[in-house]
Amino acid sequence: MAQSEKCQAPPADGPRQAKTKKLDPLVRYMIFHWILGTLGGALCATLLLVFDPFGIRPLIHDSGLGVQAVFLLYVGFMTSFGGLVCAAAVMFPPKDDDEPPRGGGLRGNVVPAKWRPRLAPVRAQTRP
């Protein structure tokens, strides 16, 4: 066999490059706002422990379960704030659409043309 007849493997960065899939913009938008909310929740939990307005720090310290209590405090704040900010971001999307909506739709009258209200006969019972 000659050298030119041998099968050669294609180069690693040749035509079979791994294609990276990009996330949908809406999914990226939601993940960004969820992470932003979790950071806000961690900040609020930290401020709550630093300034101690309700006397939580001595309760955590004296309970004997300080690590677990702080963990639960942070997890609770981070999931609550993350979900809240993500839901608010989905409900109030940015207004970057300058174009009118596509599609004509049906711009006709919703009420049928020959429709009109009619009186319905009702039987009244006489009193004995």
Image (tube, rainbow, N blue to C red):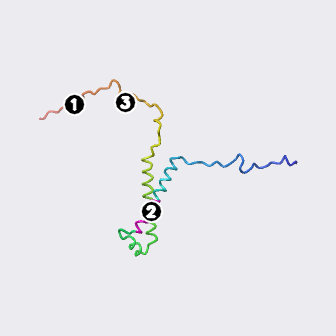
Q: Quadrant of residue 59?
A: bottom left
Above or below 47: residue 108: above
- The quadrant of the rendering that contains the C terminus is top left
Residue annotated with mark 3: 110
In the picture as drawn, the residue positioned furthest to the right comes out as 1
Q: Per the image, is 58 magenta?
A: no
Residue annotated with mark 2: 43
Q: Where is residue 51 in the image (x, y as percent from the top left)?
A: 39, 68
Q: Is mark 3 on a helix, strand or loop?
A: loop
- Which stretch is magenta? 39-50
45 and 119: which one is in front?
45
- Of mark 3 and mark 2, the one earlier in the sequence is 2
120 and 46: which one is in front?
46
Q: Is mark 2 on a helix, strand or loop?
A: helix
Which residue type does callout 2 highlight? Leu
In three-dimensional space, the C-alpha distance between marks 3 and 1, rounded to whole angstroms, equals 29 Å
Which residue type does callout 3 highlight? Val
- Of mark 1 and mark 2, the one earlier in the sequence is 2
In three-dimensional space, the C-alpha distance between marks 1 and 2, rounded to whole angstroms, equals 67 Å
Label drawn at residue 122: 1
In the picture as drawn, the residue positioned furthest to the top comes out as 114
